[in-house]
Image: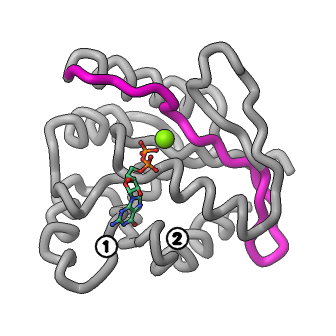
Amino acid sequence: MSFTVAIVGRPNVGKSTFFNRLLQQRKAIVDDVSGVTRDRQYGVTDWNGKYFNVIDTGGFVADSDDVFEKEIAKQVVIAIDEADAVIFMTDAATGVTDLDTSMANMLRKIKKPVFMAVNKVDNNNRMLEASEFYTFGFENVFFISSMTGSGSGELLDAITELI
Ligand code: GDP
Ligand code: MG
């Protein structure tokens, strides 16, 4: 169980919703490693019998762009230090934002597999906004809804192929 996946992305894209869904479904234990900073949560889950660790990054609420920038930079460091693969989550309800672009630029440089998960694709009406995220140029792009669970199977299939 040494494979670790970090979920990164700017605040409010749905990282924690996805993390909770992943862990509840597998009845895994969510465990707050640092009760002081609360800047990440760790859990263990499995998909088709393959177990892996999941890190939900970005636990604090920020209210200015400056703090947001620091937050996403910190998440990238967590991903580089602790993960074998990264889920880069964005939000089809808002479309591409500057913070998504900054984060994409950082993640392109890391030497780890990055799976782009465009979240909040709850229905086909969101596909137009969702397809904007192809412009970031990541090879693995998945359209998911953490609310309904749609698309997450394909994402997890792709990730667990690496294990
Ligand atoms: P985080 O800051 O990235 O961890 O985002 P959260 O998981 O806290 O979610 C932020 C907001 O987006 C919450 O109000 C969620 O209910 C909502 N949300 C998360 N996933 C989805 C989704 O797939 N569809 C929709 N419509 N809303 C979602
Ligand atoms: Mg969160």
Mark 2 vs mark 1: which is more N-terminal? 1
Quadrant in the rendering for residue 102: top left
Number of callouts in the render? Answer: 2
Residue 6 in percent (x, y) is at 58, 43
Q: Which residue is mark 1?
A: 121
User: Mark 2 or 1, which is nearer the eye?
Assistant: 1
Queried on whether the Cβ of the residue with tag 1 lies below 8 angstroms from ligand 1, the answer reads yes
Q: Residue at x 76, y 55 (%)?
A: 52
Residues at discs 2 and 1 in contact (Cβ within 8 Å): no
Q: Residue at x 37, y 28 (%)?
A: 72
Please say if 90 is above or below 160: above
Left of 154 or right of it: where is 41?
Answer: right
State the separation of the CA atoms marked 2 and 1.
Answer: 14 Å
Q: Secondary structure at mark 1?
A: loop
**Residue 113 appearing in the image:** no
Q: Which amino acid does the dot numbered 1 rest on? A: Val
Q: Nearer the viewer, residue 125 or 9?
A: 125
Residue 38 in percent (x, y) is at 61, 24
Left of 126 or right of it: where is 67?
Answer: right
Query: What segment is highlighted magenta in the picture?
Result: 44-64
Quadrant in the rendering for residue 162: bottom right
Q: Which amino acid does the dot numbered 2 rest on? A: Leu
Q: Residue at x 42, y 49 (%)?
A: 88
Mark 1 burial class by Cα count in 10 Å: few <14, some 14-19, many 20+: many
Q: Residue at x 15, y 37 (%)?
A: 98
Residue 15 in percent (x, y) is at 48, 49
Q: Nearer the viewer, residue 58 or 159?
A: 58
Magenta run includes residue 56? yes
Q: Which residue is mark 2?
A: 155
Mark 2 burial class by Cα count in 10 Å: few <14, some 14-19, many 20+: some
Magenta run includes residue 4? no
